[in-house]
């Protein structure tokens, strides 16, 4: 075993013999092995990476060193689709049958009864502390924006974003059914809150509603006028007739929409006929949409019927989208709420589960961007490389290859931010008051 990180407080030190993804390194930083890793020595000085050299090729003088012995070091994760306002409500709002309709009903009741500003703030803070401890540097959350909740939640988001600035980049996108777009008072509230507290992102949940076309037209027009990006929950359904993804892609193409568009779920795409799936994917590629799959939540909610074993994993046509050149990624989605009873905003867990559910393996390294570079691109962020001048933000694991990385949860990982180790995830007892246990 490599010793736990032991240089807390040391400003200048070297990680010796660290195994890094070559795609996270500057080109030619070191020779890559067949798994796409390179073994390097990394010098850290006052919070930044000062030097990266092939292992054993340089002398970092009197800098104390930690032997990594070929253990994997990763750059921090980016989580492009979460629900920090819903998280950790399972005890208050359990989902008795585990399907999507019951989740929506349970969550709506809990929202109306319990989502005060302090309640949302406490759960959001717990989420961000957790994500930070697991090694995540950027999070996009959807914010339920319905009725009075819109004006309650958005100021809380803005406060959290300020509090976490420099540690986690927090982005937020409003969430409501596309039908609400036709309600002018609702849209006035949403526009005001995104203007005052948002991240220049507008969003909605789309399905085969009679209001789909008109709703999308209004959303695209508003985003265009404001210079905002778009982020949709799309076709979270096992019905192959759910095709709102096509409508979004076609509208983006016709309007030559200049902003970024992210679409999440797109479950029904993988149940359509091969021809239909291909046509849709071609439009998605042409429109330049980024697709985020939420494999843990999809496998929990989709194809669930009491007394019947699920046959379908619930996920979108991920490989086909990637082959068509679409920017694809995976993300956490819900955490301990009626939509997903588990989860911990741990992108290493999401990656591990995505490898298993979506077969993101052979070669593993081909898919490594789905937890970092791809979501960073979708969110308009720069994914820092492990190179001189970059912040010393690193996730140190005990694994030496991909099977070791994905076989264990790596709860013993060390997360460095600006060269200093961060603490463990918060204790669940911190939630007792909001969960009604205190
Ligand atoms: Zn979602």
Image (cartoon, rainbow, N blue to C red):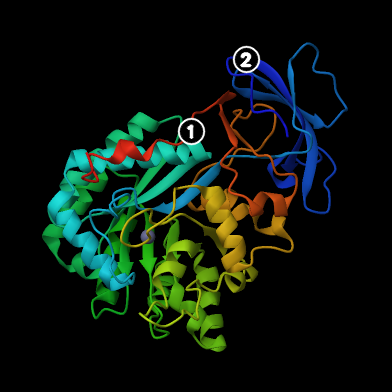
Q: For this view, does 339 lie left or right of residue 21?
A: left
Asked if residue 383 is positioned above or below residue 288 in the image, the reply reads above
- Judged from this view, the residue extending furthest toward the right is 57
Residue on which disc 1 sits: 424
Disc 1 residue: CB within 8 Å of ligand 1: no
Quarter of the figure that contains the N terminus = top right
- Nearer to us in this view, 364 or 337: 337
Label 1 and label 2: CA atoms lie apart by 21 Å
**Residue 324 in which image quadrant:** bottom right
Q: Can residue 418 be seen here?
A: no
Residue on which disc 2 sits: 11
| The disc label shown at residue 91, or none | none
Q: For this view, does 107 lie left or right of residue 129?
A: left
Residue at figure coordinates x 39%, y 32% from the top left: 164
Q: Can residue 388 be seen here?
A: yes
Per the image, label 2 sits on a secondary structure element best described as loop
Report crowding for label 2: few under 14, some 14 to 19, many 20 or more residues within 10 A (C-alpha): some
Q: For this view, does 27 lie left or right of residue 49?
A: right
Asked if residue 4 is positioned above or below residue 195 in the image, the reply reads above
Ligand 1 position by quadrant: bottom left
Q: Circles 1 and 2: CB distance less than 8 Å? A: no
Tag in front: 1 or 2: 1
Residue at figure coordinates x 32%, y 75% from the top left: 207
Residue at figure coordinates x 20%, y 45% from the top left: 436
Total marks shown come to: 2
Residue at figure coordinates x 34%, y 29% from the top left: 163
Quarter of the figure that contains the C terminus = top left
Q: Position of residue 127 (x, y in %)?
A: 38, 42
Per the image, label 1 sits on a secondary structure element best described as loop
Q: For this view, does 431 lie left or right of residue 408?
A: left
């Amino acid at each position: 075993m490599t010793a736990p990180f032991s240089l807390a407080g040391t400003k200048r030190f070297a990680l010796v013999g660290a195994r890094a993804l070559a795609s996270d390194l500057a080109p030619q930083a070191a020779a890559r092995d067949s798994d796409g890793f390179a073994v390097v020595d990394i010098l850290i000085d006052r919070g930044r990476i000062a030097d990266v050299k092939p292992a054993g090729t340089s002398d970092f003088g009197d800098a104390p060193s930690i032997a990594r012995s070929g253990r994997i070091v990763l750059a921090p994760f980016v989580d492009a689709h979460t629900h920090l306002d819903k998280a950790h409500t399972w005890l208050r709002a359990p989902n008795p049958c585990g399907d999507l309709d019951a989740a929506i009903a349970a969550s709506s009741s809990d929202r109306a009864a319990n989502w005060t500003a302090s309640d949302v703030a406490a759960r959001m803070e717990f989420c961000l502390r957790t994500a930070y401890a697991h090694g995540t540097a950027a999070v996009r959350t959807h914010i339920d924006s319905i009725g009075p909740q819109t004006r309650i939640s958005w100021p809380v988001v803005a406060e959290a974003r300020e509090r976490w600035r420099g540690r986690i980049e927090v982005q937020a996108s409003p969430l409501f059914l596309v039908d609400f777009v036709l309600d002018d008072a609702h849209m006035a509230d949403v526009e005001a809150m995104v203007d005052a507290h948002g991240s220049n992102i507008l969003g909605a949940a789309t399905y085969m509603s009679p209001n789909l076309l008109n709703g999308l037209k209004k959303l695209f027009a508003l985003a265009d006028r404001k210079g905002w990006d778009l982020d949709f929950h799309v076709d979270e359904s096992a019905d192959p007739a759910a095709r709102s993804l096509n409508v979004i892609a076609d509208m983006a193409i016709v309007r030559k929409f200049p902003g970024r568009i992210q679409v999440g779920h797109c479950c029904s795409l993988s149940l359509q006929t091969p021809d239909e799936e291909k046509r849709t994917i071609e439009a998605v590629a042409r429109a330049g949409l980024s697709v985020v799959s939420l494999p843990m939540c999809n496998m929990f909610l989709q194809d669930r019927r009491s007394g019947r074993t699920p046959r379908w994993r619930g996920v979108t046509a991920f490989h086909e989208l990637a082959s068509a050149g679409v920017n694809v990624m995976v993300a956490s989605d819900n955490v301990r709420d009626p939509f997903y009873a588990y989860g911990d905003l741990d992108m290493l867990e999401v990656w591990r589960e995505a490898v298993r559910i979506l077969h993101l393996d052979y070669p593993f390294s081909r898919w490594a961007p789905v937890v970092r570079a791809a979501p960073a691109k979708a969110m308009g962020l720069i994914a820092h490389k492990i190179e001189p001048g970059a912040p010393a933000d690193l996730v140190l694991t005990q694994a030496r290859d991909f099977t070791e990385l994905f076989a264990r949860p790596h709860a013993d990982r060390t997360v460095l931010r600006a060269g200093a180790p961060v603490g463990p995830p918060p204790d669940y007892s911190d939630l007792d008051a909001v969960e009604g246990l205190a």
